[in-house]
Image (tube, helix red, strand yellow):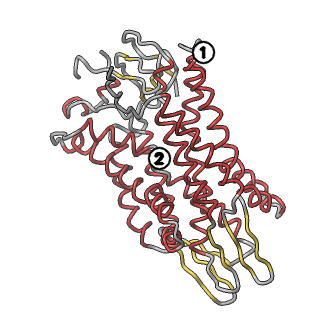
């Protein structure tokens, strides 16, 4: 462990000396009570496992049918980006770009950033640009909203019930699973600059005793 | 006498205030202009955010109506009020209730994303319901203003640095909380 390792609260800026955490235990900021770090319930590689799984699930989510709707013999199949295409064609290009980013590209970018951040510790590689990746992941977190898109689709399904006949396609289930993986991976990552490879094998260094 | 122009800082109360004000302005057309139009045989209607939620309520979909109302009307308003409170507290000097204000900031940061619900909903409906004369849903200009308001509130929250609610202090060991 690095002797200078410390946890800085993102909300109040208070510096803390690291401590050991049992699985499920949380380290709270002494000043504002924000959660600084959580003891990993499923081991130190949780974030890597879920981020890689999320990346794999993103492919079928993007290309398989999301929802199909039928009315009077006419059927229409919607994919993840059908709404984006519709907005783009309706002279609302910037809203289309926003939906594409928040619901498609940025969640995948966040999953990729989390995977790249945790892969060196798992494979014993030399970490590269950890601080930059960690900051990028933190910023991406504010703009990746797949869970909101899932809720929107569920609301739409309820709304469409009386208007058309709807069938949920496999793409939607893959997207739900990807969103869940992203949530777990995010929850397992403390958005602190990670310590060197040697320190992350076993317990996370930023939660070790000083 | 010449003055050196100050460098623009994204994370500052003035930037947060400007973005929050812009978001408040955008919320006016967002709530008064139609966001969706639905064309079905014998019935064409334009819906604003509020009338859309009200229609769901009238059809007995109370839970969905409440979700839409909360995400699209309540959250943006609460977020702007909360940001205004934080900005006023900072303006008055070092606040005494820093802990409470920090919790409010954390809550605002968390709830902001859910306002995107209506934008995703409109995108999904306009993409799927295109059955010509039988049933068609189209996005209207209100959704553009609403999306702008959501983006501006998210940016405003990011521009507000909650650390200014506190004065610096030396490193300590964090508290432990059981799961």
Q: Residue at x 42, y 26 (%)?
A: A22
Q: Which residue is mark 1?
A: B97
For the N terminus of chain B, the image quarter is top left
Drawn side of residue B66 relative to residue A138, left or right = right
Give the residue at the far bottom of this rendering: A73
Q: Residues within 10 Å of mark 1 (few under 14, many from 20)?
A: few
Q: Residues within 10 Å of mark 2 (few under 14, many from 20)?
A: some
Q: Residue at x 36, y 57 (%)?
A: A55
Quick check: can you spot residue A25? no
Q: For mark 1, name the chain.
A: B
- The percent position of residue A139, horizontal first and vertical second, equals 39, 41
Drawn side of residue B48 relative to residue A136, left or right = right
- The percent position of residue B10, horizontal first and vertical second, equals 41, 35
**Which residue occupies the foreground of this view, A151 or B105?**
B105
Q: For mark 2, name the chain.
A: A
Secondary structure of the residue carrying tag 1 is loop
Quick check: can you spot residue A188? yes
- Figure quadrant of residue A38: top left
Give the residue at the far left of this rendering: A126
- Number of numbered callouts drawn: 2
Secondary structure of the residue carrying tag 2 is helix
Measure how far apart labels 2 and 1 are at the Cα level: 31 Å
Does A132 sit above or below residue A110?
above
Query: Which dot marks residue B112?
Result: none
Does A12 sit above or below residue B124?
above
- The percent position of residue B159, horizontal first and vertical second, equals 46, 34
Does A119 sit above or below residue A18?
below
Query: Which dot marks residue A183?
Result: 2
Does B167 sit above or below residue A90?
above
């Amino acid at each position: 462990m690095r002797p200078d390792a410390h946890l800085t609260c993102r909300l109040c800026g208070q510096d803390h000396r690291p401590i050991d955490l049992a699985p499920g235990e949380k380290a709270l900021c002494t000043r504002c009570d924000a959660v600084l770090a959580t003891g990993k319930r499923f081991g130190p590689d949780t974030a890597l496992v879920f981020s890689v799984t999320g990346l794999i699930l993103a492919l079928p989510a993007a290309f398989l049918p999301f929802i199909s709707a039928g009315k009077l013999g006419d059927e229409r199949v919607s994919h993840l980006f059908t709404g984006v295409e519709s907005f783009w064609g309706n002279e609302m290009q910037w809203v289309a770009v926003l939906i594409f980013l928040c619901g498609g590209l940025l969640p995948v970018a966040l999953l990729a950033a989390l995977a790249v951040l945790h892969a060196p510790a798992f494979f014993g590689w030399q970490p590269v640009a950890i601080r930059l990746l960690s900051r990028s992941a933190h910023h991406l977190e504010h703009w990746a909203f797949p869970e909101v898109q899932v809720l929107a689709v569920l609301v739409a399904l309820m709304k469409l019930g009386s208007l058309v006949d709807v069938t949920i396609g496999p793409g939607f289930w893959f997207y739900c699973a990807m969103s869940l993986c992203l949530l777990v991976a995010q929850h397992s990552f403390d958005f602190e600059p990670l310590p060197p490879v040697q320190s992350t094998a076993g317990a996370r260094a930023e939660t070790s005793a000083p | 006498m010449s003055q050196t122009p100050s460098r623009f800082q994204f994370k500052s109360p003035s930037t947060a205030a400007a973005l929050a004000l812009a978001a408040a302005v955008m919320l006016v057309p967002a709530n008064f202009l139609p966001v969706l139009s639905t064309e079905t045989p014998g019935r064409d209607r334009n819906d604003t955010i509020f009338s859309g939620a009200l229609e769901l309520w009238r059809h007995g979909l109370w839970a969905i109506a409440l979700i839409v109302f909360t995400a699209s009307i309540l959250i943006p308003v609460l977020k702007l009020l909360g940001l205004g409170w934080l900005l006023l507290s900072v303006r008055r000097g070092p606040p005494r209730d820093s802990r409470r204000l920090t919790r409010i900031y954390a809550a605002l940061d968390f709830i902001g994303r859910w306002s995107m619900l209506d934008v995703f909903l409109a995108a999904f409906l306009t993409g799927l319901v295109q059955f010509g004369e039988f049933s068609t849903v189209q996005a209207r200009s209100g959704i553009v203003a609403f999306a702008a308001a959501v983006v501006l509130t998210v940016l405003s929250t990011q521009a507000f640095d909650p650390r200014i609610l506190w004065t610096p202090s030396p490193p300590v060991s964090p508290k432990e909380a059981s799961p």
